[in-house]
Structures are given as structure tokens and as C-alpha cells.
């Protein structure tokens, strides 16, 4: 991320770990104010302390469960009360669920729908109006390679990410006249805590390994900022992920269904 791409204030959701934490760390030297949002206040405070020891930016911690509509409304009200008007919004918070759809816990699926779709759209709707007329403004929505694939055992998760990618593409067209960039970040497998969150209990085995496609979170975030600088609509970080996305995008649906039906599932 070049210094010329500096933003005055950035809001990062899901900032307590994984990609959100990495977004915060890479943004810290380049923003005046950094707002960290997540459920786990202890991890947010630790991250804020680490950033404060190294960088001059103001760090604000707002502990929020984005699956809860009342807490989201309180977050938005708190941002307005504190006169926080971000020119960069990174919708990174997300939940997953791995396993057959018919055996899924409904409350877990509902929380995933609320965080992955409802919260993302809600925060974007609340904060984008304040970006209009700014010298530079952008929204990064963290989607997934799964957004272009019908993945068994990830049916609802993949569907939520398909929504995120489609929403990002449409919003990008709408906001172009206002000079606001919108990027859909579509990573493949990344070594974060996502796998543990997506698992159904301690006795469930892990998701099928795709070590060949794993990309470090540092590279994912760096490529996101590079794509934003180049004003791209979406990015699939990592060469292998990019090639896979190109192949799947050109693949007839019948062939894709055949491939997905033979994909290794519960390992």
C-alpha cells in the first residue's frame, strides 16, 4: 500500500484476528485514525496496544457482536457520536460452517447469514453516505474464492460469499460517479482461525487440506491494497488461486457440478 493511498480514517471489522488483524497492522502506519471492531475485546485491546507502541495513529476499539442487530445499531450510533466518518471501510468479519446442510445447527447458520451478509450491508449502508464528496474513499468487502463455486459441505457459506461478491460488483458501478472504490477480496484458503470457527465441535475432523493453494494472510492483505490502488473490481490473491478462479469462471456449470461432486469432503 503506497503512501499516496493514505486514508484519514479506516474501520476494520473482524479485527481481532486473522485477516482483520493483518489489515489493521498494515493500515496503522498509513491512517490517522483506526477503528477496530470485533466481538473479542481482549484481543482488540491487545492489538490496539501493539499498534500504539509502534505507530502514531489513533486507535479506537469498539467491541461489537455484528450478528446482533441492536449491537450493530449501537455501533453505528457510537461512530456518529464520536464524529467518526471513515473514508475506508473494510468489511472483513465473517463466520463459516463446515458440514452437511441438513445436519447444521440453525442458530449457527443464522449467525453466519447475519454477519456475512446483513452486517456487511448494514455497515456499508450506514457509512457510505459519509464518503461521498471525499477526496478518496473506498470499501473492501472480504468475499472468497468460494463465491464462484457451489461447494458441498460449505453450501450456505459459499452462498453468502456469492452475495458479497455480487453486491460489491453492483455497488462499485453505483458509486463510481462519486469516486468511491469498491473491491471484492476473494481469497482461497488462508491460515487463520477460520477453520476452527467453521468446525462443528471438537470431534469433527478438519476440512480437506489444500496446502497447495494456501496463501499467507500478509500477502492476501498486501494484494488487496495493490488491487485497490489499481482500481480493480475484485482480486483472487495468490497465483494458484487466480488461475483456479479463471478456470472455474470459464467452466460450464455441468462440468463444475461434476468436479464439485468428486471434491474430497470430510477428511
Image (cartoon, helix red, strand yellow):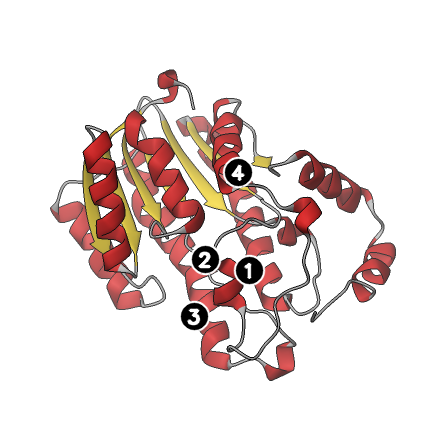
The numbered mark, 4 or 2, whose residue comes first in the sequence reads: 2
Instruction: Name the quadrant of the N terminus.
Output: top left
Do we see residue 173 in this rendering? no
Report the Cα–Cα distance between label 2 and label 3: 10 Å
Find numbered disc 2 in the image and state the secondary structure of the residue it sits on. loop
Q: In the rendered structure, which disc, 4 or 1, sits on the residue that comes first in sequence?
A: 1
Question: Which numbered mark, 4 or 1, is in the foreground of this view?
Answer: 4
Mark 2 crowd level (few <14, some 14–19, many ≥20, 10 Å Cα): many
Give the Cα distance between marks 1 and 3. Answer: 12 Å
Which quadrant of the figure has residue 250?
top right
Q: Secondary structure at mark 4?
A: helix
Judging from the image, what secondary structure is the residue with disc 1 in?
helix
Which is more foreground, mark 4 or mark 2? 4
Query: In this view of the protein, can residue 116 be seen by the observer?
Result: yes
Q: Image quadrant of residue 87? A: top left
Which of the labelled discs sits on residue 111, or is there none? 3
Q: In the current view of this chain or complex, which residue is farthest to the top?
A: 4
In the picture of the structure, the residue carrying the numbered disc 2 is 94
Observer-nearest of 60 and 155: 60
Q: Earlier in the sequence, mark 1 or mark 2?
A: 2
Instruction: State the image coordinates of residue 238 (x, y, percent, origin top left).
Output: 63, 36
Residue 55 % position (x, y) = 23, 29
The earlier-in-sequence mark between 1 and 3 is 3
Q: Please, what secondary structure does the residue beneath circle 3 have?
A: helix
Please state if 21 lies on the left or on the right of 83 as rendered.
right
Quadrant location of the C terminus? bottom right
Disc on the earlier residue, 4 or 3:
3
**Circle 4 is placed at which residue position?**
220
Going 34% across and 49% down the picture, which residue do you hit? 15
Amino acid at each position: 500500500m503506497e503512501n499516496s493511498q493514505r486514508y484519514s480514517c479506516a474501520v476494520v471489522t473482524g479485527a481481532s484476528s486473522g485477516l482483520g488483524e493483518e489489515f489493521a497492522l498494515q493500515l496503522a502506519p498509513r491512517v490517522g485514525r483506526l477503528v477496530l471492531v470485533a466481538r473479542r475485546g481482549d484481543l482488540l485491546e491487545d492489538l490496539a496496544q501493539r499498534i500504539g507502541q509502534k505507530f502514531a495513529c489513533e486507535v479506537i476499539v469498539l467491541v461489537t457482536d455484528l450478528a446482533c442487530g441492536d449491537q450493530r445499531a449501537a455501533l453505528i450510533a457510537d461512530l456518529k457520536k464520536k464524529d467518526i466518518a471513515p473514508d475506508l471501510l473494510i468489511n472483513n468479519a465473517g463466520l463459516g460452517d463446515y458440514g452437511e446442510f441438513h445436519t447444521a445447527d440453525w442458530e449457527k447458520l443464522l449467525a453466519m447469514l447475519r454477519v456475512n451478509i446483513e452486517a456487511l450491508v448494514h455497515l456499508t449502508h450506514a457509512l457510505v453516505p459519509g464518503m461521498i464528496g471525499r477526496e478518496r474513499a473506498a470499501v473492501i468487502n472480504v468475499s472468497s474464492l468460494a463465491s464462484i463455486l457451489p461447494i458441498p459441505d460449505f453450501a450456505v457459506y459459499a452462498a453468502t460469499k456469492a452475495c458479497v461478491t455480487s453486491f460489491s460488483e453492483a455497488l462499485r458501478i453505483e458509486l463510481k460517479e462519486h469516486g468511491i472504490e469498491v473491491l471484492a477480496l476473494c481469497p482461497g484458503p488462508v491460515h487463520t482461525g477460520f477453520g476452527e470457527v467453521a468446525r462443528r465441535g471438537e470431534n469433527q475432523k478438519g476440512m480437506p487440506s489444500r496446502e497447495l493453494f494456501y496463501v499467507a494472510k500478509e500477502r492476501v492483505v498486501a494484494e488487496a491494497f495493490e488491487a485497490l490502488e489499481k482500481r480493480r473490481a475484485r482480486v483472487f490473491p495468490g497465483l494458484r488461486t487466480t488461475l483456479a478462479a479463471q478456470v472455474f469462471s470459464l467452466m460450464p456449470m455441468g462440468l463444475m457440478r461434476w468436479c464439485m461432486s468428486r471434491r474430497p469432503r470430510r477428511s
